[in-house]
Amino acid sequence: MRADEALKLTDVLTSVVQVGLVVADLDAKMEGMRAVFGLEPDTLFEAAFAGTLYRGQVIDAPARIANYDYFGVQLEFIQPLGDTSIWRDFLNETSGSKHALHHVRFTDVEDNDVVTRLMQERGIERYQEVKSFVHPGGKGTYYDTVEQLGFFVEVVTKA
């Protein structure tokens, strides 16, 4: 890239690796994956997500998660367990639906500050930030693109 060219988000967000769905009943969705595709989750876990940065405050954001690594992109089903998190907010804001497309994840991003700056230039703020399970020492940042896209953009940085 030439020095006089403006950096674009597509310069730093280069591959989609995950589609995340927030669900009210994870067991029902896992049964659906069994019935439709004959699949069990590749990973199934419950986490407190302690020390999560949520709208400027540090909280615990417990959730139960099932991941399916079958379709060339990971499908992540997230059931929020607490009252305060990006996931609970999203379920509540989608008219209390039983499920909703929550995020599209980009991974292996070198510099989260660059992405944050580019997002802010577009009027998009960080909504929540968690410690990465994908890259120890890295972080997963959710950007509030719901108004523009109908879902959040998640960016996972390397350590």
Image (cartoon, helix red, strand yellow):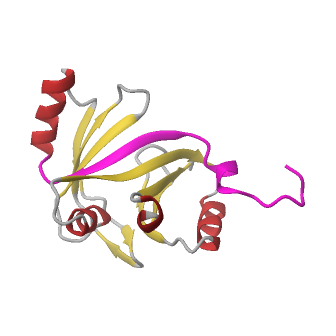
Spot the residue most to the bottom. Answer: 56
**Camera-nearest residue between 58 and 154:** 154
Spot the residue most to the top. Answer: 38
**Camera-nearest residue between 127 and 130:** 127
Q: Is residue 92 left or right of residue 136?
A: left
Q: Is residue 12 left or right of residue 26?
A: right
Q: Please tell me which residue is depicted at 15% across the width and 45% down the height of the picture.
A: 26
Residue 1, placed above or below residue 119: above
Q: Please tell me which residue is depicted at 40% across the width and 46% down the height of the picture.
A: 133
Residue 39 at least partly seen: no
Q: Please tell me which residue is depicted at 25% across the width and 58% down the height of the picture.
A: 48
The total of numbered circles placed on residues is: 0
Q: Please tell me which residue is depicted at 17% across the width and 65% down the height of the picture.
A: 82
* Place of residue 94 in the rendered image (x, y in percent of width and height, measured from the top left): 24, 64
Q: Is residue 24 magenta?
A: yes
Q: Is residue 104 left or right of residue 8?
A: left
* Place of residue 17 in the rendered image (x, y in percent of width and height, measured from the top left): 47, 38
Q: Which residues are magenta?
A: 1-25
Residue 13, placed above or below residue 68: below
**Camera-nearest residue between 26 and 146:** 146
Q: Is residue 70 magenta?
A: no
Q: Quadrant of residue 150?
A: bottom left
Residue 133 at least partly seen: yes
* Place of residue 153 in the rendered image (x, y in percent of width and height, measured from the top left): 47, 56
* Place of residue 66 in the rendered image (x, y in percent of width and height, measured from the top left): 24, 40
